Image (cartoon, rainbow, N blue to C red):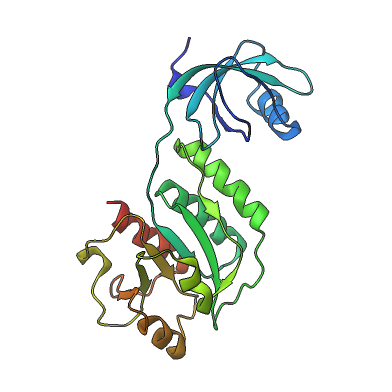
Amino acid sequence: MKDITKMPRLFIQNILSLGKTIALTKEQSHYIRNVLRLTMGDFIRVFNGKDGEFLSSLTKSDKMCEITVQNLLKPQTISKGPWLFFSPIKKDRLSFLIEKAVELGVQKLIPVITERTIVRTFNIEKAHLSIIEASEQCERLDVPEILPFITLKDIFKTLKEPQRLYFCKERSDAPPLRSLSISPDSGILIGPEGGFADTEIAFLESSPQTQAVSLGDRILRAETAAIYALSQISS
């Protein structure tokens, strides 16, 4: 058997248990046959975000493939990661933001409409597929959750007590994010491309649950700010 870490990795919705045979979806079967070019007896790793990661063998390799679950490779662990609240941005940059956020351990992604938000449409199904793909590639055992749009005023209804929210404030004397001791499951809020309106800053600062933070002297693009902030927390 070749190096297990080199084997393809696939997220599936099914419950995983030893010896179970699972029919793959049409899309997964196409990927297995035509992209990976696997054949009967080849191995893949599978996970569902709940039961751990398993080694499985391809036991049917026609139009609709089947796998048989064999060995548990990694037991499921409960991970804690930040919640990323972000103002949606253009398609390609948003895909990049989602991919890197998943790699950096984010647990939830929550798009937020603000006064200066430019992109006000959001394909949650496509975002979910991007999250799954990133989770497969970076070898996470869990799959982050993507929530529907919320407004800025609803942000505190989404947070859980005593979860803190750190919002990135441009051109301010707020303490640098890197200087703070932050719980790994805190919320991080990245503003829109034009920054927060003054009324929005006042609203955020009025809550004892929030803390304004600085990401440095430079004005960062939204996706850069998100990656920088998540990197500071994960490190």
Given residues 37 and 23, the one toward you in this image is 23
Q: Position of residue 217 (x, y in %)?
A: 28, 75
Given residues 210 and 162, the one toward you in this image is 162
The total number of labels drawn is: 0
- Residue 228 vs 73, above or below: the answer is below
Residue at the outermost bottom position: 199
- Residue 164 vs 13, above or below: the answer is below
Direction from residue 216 to residue 60 in the image, left or right: right
Given residues 42 and 143, the one toward you in this image is 143
Residue at the outermost front position: 161
Direction from residue 124 to residue 76 in the image, left or right: left
Q: Position of residue 192 (x, y in %)?
A: 50, 75
Residue at the outermost right position: 63
Q: Position of residue 154 (x, y in %)?
A: 53, 75
The structure residue drawn at horizontal position 50% and vertical position 49%, both measured from the top left corner, is 144
The structure residue drawn at horizontal position 39% and vertical position 49%, both measured from the top left corner, is 104
Direction from residue 102 to residue 170 in the image, left or right: left
The structure residue drawn at horizontal position 40% and vertical position 81%, both measured from the top left corner, is 204
The structure residue drawn at horizontal position 61% and vertical position 63%, both measured from the top left corner, is 148
Residue 34, quarter of the rendered image: top right
- Residue 91 vs 49, above or below: the answer is below
Q: Position of residue 146 (x, y in %)?
A: 56, 55
